[in-house]
Image: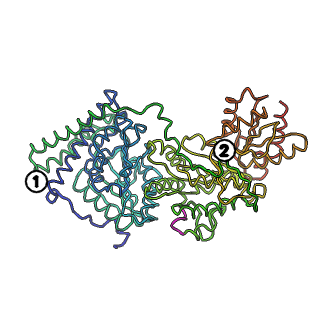
Amino acid sequence: MKDINKLHDLEVPQEFSVRKTPKKQLEHWYRLMTIGRIIDEKAPNYLKQALGWSYHAPYAGHDGIQLAIGQVFKKEQDYYFPYYRDMLACLSAGMSAEELLLNGLSKAADPSSGGRHMSNHFAKPEINIENVSSNTGNHTLHAVGVARSLKYYKDDGVAMSSQGESSVSEGYVYEAINGASKEKLPVIFVFQDNGYGISVPKRDQTARRKVADNFRGFKNLRIIHCNGKDVFDSMNAMSEAHRWAKENQMPCIVHANCVRIHSHSNSDRHDLYRDEDELVYTKAYDPLAKFERMLIRYGHFTEEELTQIKQESKDVVNKAHRKVITEKGPSSESIFDFVTPEPYVSTKYPDGTHQYDGPKKKLIEALNETLKAEFRHNPETFLYGQDMANKKKGGVFNVAKGMQPEFGKGRVFNGPIAEDYIVGTANGMSRYKKQNIRVVIEGAEFADYFWPAMEQFVDSSHDYWRSNGKFSPNMTIRLASGGYIGGGIYHSQNIEGSLTTFPGVRVVYPSYADDAAGLLRTSIRSKGMTMFLEPKALYNSDKTATSIPDDFEVPFGKLRVRKEGKDLSVITYGNTVPMCMEVANELEKEGYNIEIIDLRSLVPLDIEGIKASVKKTNKAIVIHEDKVFSGFGAEIVSEVMETCFEDLDGPIKRVGAKFTPVGFNPALEKATLPNNQLIKDAIIDTLKY
């Protein structure tokens, strides 16, 4: 191999040219280009007639590179992540005119999303054209993740992502390219450079005239520039990029210079920021018109032959239109389909309890042993995150201690300090369809540091729904949560109140060792995404050490009554559960009979279990570590008031942290977070009703 520092200077073989390419191949390309352009020009008319295509980003001017992307893509072997302007690329990659129209008109039969996602977001997961979101450029992370799986399983496939040059300004795109270069992954990043990000000119986006050149210092990364308006230059560039990524198992950027002939989208007016000379220039450089002239000039086709092909392309589109226009849209009731994937169901422990009486184990032991057991159970399970795999160490709290020595660097490895990269590539890894992949990640060293990953968290939360049930990111995201360790800001905050507002995600928060083991096993074996919050202050606590059956499983949405009672229902979870237990035992000596409900699972929430307890005691109090204002307890109170109002003898009190950051000084932390005395006083006040 040549010096990797000179990868950008390698020549691109000129395999394709107007002279060398067979007429049959040229005809095939021309048919694709004319079909695509007819649909591209027809799309705005559907909007004018209120038939669909409420969002349309025309691709005209990107014809060369988009044709080439689809032509080098190998269906069911490669993985392709298009962006919202990639109509011709998806057609060239294997989608039909009918399937493009189904998406544009948001029909139930749309292979991209069943009409759920925005129009012009094309996908066909059956052939590995992946469903991506509207968050421009974030799918670069997914492409890197699936490339990691391709390399691990020694697959011949290549991952490809496509985007406009302006979206490269996003931080997660840098993370994707940096990570792919570091891991030496077979992924191609295509930048379609038309000079604008909506109305923002390129000079306001990048210091380099060609955005790909900003990455010239990256090791293991090849950069290829091409004329994205020219079919042959684009074909040569994409073919070489595909060969390079596949043979060398390294990433490649293809920077394609394009021209945007029309406005950014149907909601944009480019005449407001482009002068007349520029608009004339864009039309003069129409790639389709140039291709037609070349085909005639070099004697491959006559004008009459091209006219005949264009007519046949119109017939293809018209036939597709007649069929699609009669298709039904998705029913309003279907909106509730595919919100959250079906979880793993326990047959041995249906209510998540057991009678096993063996040696007690601490919460950290329970997590560590369950991780190892699940890695032995399913060889397609992976674990990574920050500080996860350094010899005998396993995470900042050593929860994963001993994992890498037993299971190897291919399955247990470190991620960079880039939380979005960790979550996004986990999403991508689980897209590799040939295996039963489950990915466990430490989403951040502390839960408070998870915020940079929220972009990927949100995107992953609706993957299953957005793809109409065709893809779910099978991830368990572990987060060391809560305070009581003197950690202060970014080390002791609670974030579950934010996480639980997103449909499509399960959120669990065990406090005892057996529940931690059972919920972790269920989380890993289930499809979809589970946020697994671990009360780090209880990792080594004797208070929550328990006996644990080796095969214990806890279903989602099943609370656990930790202490039976009749005077008051204490609804709690996480770090405050053992506190409530201590207070309840103390109050029992004073004649009070308190019931302690450990929620364990926040989403789904065991509403029926809560109702049963409240109906029995007629009094309730919600106690958690998070802030009272907008904390998760507010949702619990609302649910109880809506379903059990007639059973209550008085209002429901909430106990939680004060509305302030958690201080580092022990005195400040103590003044912020709930404690036994505060809990006891609140319980006694509630008992007075």
Query: What residue would you read off at disc 1?
Result: 298
Residue at 74% x, 41% y is 623
Of helix, strand and loop, which one carries label 1? loop
Query: What residue would you read off at disc 2?
Result: 558
> Along the horizontal axis of the image, is 632 left or right of 131?
right
Q: Is residue 162 above or below residue 359?
A: above
Task: Identify the image quadrant of residue 624.
Answer: top right
Dot 1: few (<14), some (14–19), or many (≥20) neighbours within 10 Å? Answer: few
Task: Identify the image quadrant of residue 563.
Answer: top right
Horizontal and vertical percent position of residue 244: 33, 65
Dot 2: few (<14), some (14–19), or many (≥20) neighbours within 10 Å? Answer: many
Horizontal and vertical percent position of residue 345: 59, 49
Image quadrant occupied by the C terminus? top right
* Amino acid type, label 1: Tyr
- The answer to if 413 sits in the magenta stretch is yes
Give the alpha-carbon distance from disc 2 to disc 1, as whole Å.
Answer: 72 Å
> Along the horizontal axis of the image, is 135 left or right of 238?
right
The number of discs equals: 2
Q: Is residue 315 above or below residue 425?
A: above
Of helix, strand and loop, which one carries label 2? loop
For residue 457, say whether it is visible: yes
Residue closer to the observer: 472 or 631 = 472
Please name which of the two marks, 2 or 1, marks the residue nearer to the observer: 2
* Residue range highlighted in magenta: 408-415
